[in-house]
Image: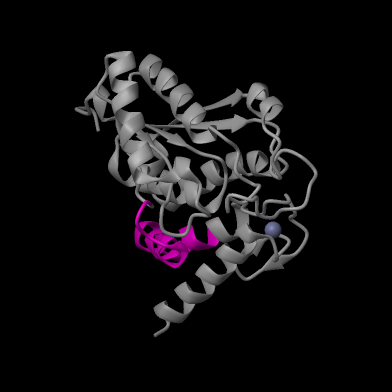
């Protein structure tokens, strides 16, 4: 990849969950230079941050080319985001729904803040693509995961930083079963197994019990979605 242009690089929003790990594999499959960014905002499931290094190491072993392309890892502490949000992701309260229909796991402004910091970092690192696991298909109604929000953010960031960033959201229109299938297409069984074993999804941060689809409490909305998606993926891939 000696002739790779600097603007072919990508920065992946990498939390250590199933979606962002699949996005990282997607980016490694496409771009000659890929860096990762994780945020610590006091999330209850911050155990996911500890999964990141093992996932990066594992991805480098799935494909030799991926090892060459995988660059620096960055983490940013965003304590201020945790300080202003009263949500079930950042406080010890029961996960449920609010009057407006949004789940109380919604952290207001989270993806807007993440993307702004990601763009600021990508600017410094000379990376053109910003890759995130936002998804409109299986999402819980989070307005900051919508495709229109992403497109508006791309315009705002490009205007505000005088750059030509591209926000890539490879999972936007696929469901959880198709996300497992995408991992299978990108890295085969090795990648599916790596994601099941090392990625973290559970909102409650539980990693006690190992299910077929990975670790988690098994009952929170995130575990439920991941488990059902995996079951459908297995059913569809075995015909
Ligand atoms: Zn769970």
- Closer to us: 40 or 209: 40
Dividing the picture into quadrants, the one containing residue 69 is top left
Q: Is residue 191 magenta?
A: yes
Where is 15 relative to 18, above or below? above
Q: Quadrant of the N terminus?
A: top left
Q: Is residue 164 magenta?
A: no
Dividing the picture into quadrants, the one containing residue 153 is top left
Residue extending farthest left: 3
Provide the major secondary structure of the magenta segment: helix
Q: Quadrant of the C terminus?
A: bottom left
Residue 54 shown left or right of residue 31 in the figure: right
Image coordinates of residue 45 in percent, x first then y, are 69, 44
Task: Mark yes or no: residue 65 visible.
Answer: no
Image coordinates of residue 111 in percent, x first then y, are 49, 35
Q: Residue at 51% of width from left, 39% of height from top?
A: 14
Image coordinates of residue 184 in percent, x first then y, are 40, 63
* Location of ligand 1 given as a quarter of the image: bottom right
Residue 226 shown left or right of residue 203 in the figure: left
- Closer to us: 204 or 58: 204
- The boundaries of the magenta stretch are 172-194
Residue extending farthest bottom: 239
- Closer to us: 100 or 78: 100
Q: Residue at 33% of width from left, 23% of height from top?
A: 156
């Amino acid at each position: 990849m000696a002739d790779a242009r600097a603007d072919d690089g990508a920065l992946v929003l990498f939390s250590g969950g199933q979606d962002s790990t699949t996005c990282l594999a997607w980016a490694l499959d496409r771009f000659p230079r890929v860096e990762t960014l994780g945020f610590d905002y006091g999330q209850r499931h911050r155990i996911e941050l500890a999964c990141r290094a093992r996932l990066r190491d594992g991805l480098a072993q799935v494909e030799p080319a991926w090892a060459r392309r995988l660059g620096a890892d960055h983490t940013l502490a965003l304590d201020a985001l945790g300080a202003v949000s009263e949500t079930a992701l950042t406080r010890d309260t029961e996960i449920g729904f609010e009057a407006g229909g949004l789940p109380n796991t919604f952290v207001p402004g989270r993806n807007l803040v993440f993307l702004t910091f990601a763009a600021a970092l990508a600017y410094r690192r000379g990376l053109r693509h910003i890759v995130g696991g936002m998804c409109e298909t299986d999402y819980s109604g989070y307005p900051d995961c919508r495709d229109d929000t992403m497109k508006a953010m791309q315009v705002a960031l490009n205007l505000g930083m005088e750059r030509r960033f591209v926000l890539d959201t490879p999972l936007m229109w696929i469901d959880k079963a198709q996300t497992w299938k995408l991992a299978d297409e990108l890295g085969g069984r090795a990648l599916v197994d790596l994601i099941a074993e090392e990625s973290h999804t559970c909102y409650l941060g539980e990693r006690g019990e190992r299910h077929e689809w990975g670790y988690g409490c098994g009952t929170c909305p995130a575990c439920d979605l991941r488990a059902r998606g995996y079951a459908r993926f297995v059913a569809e891939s075995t015909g």
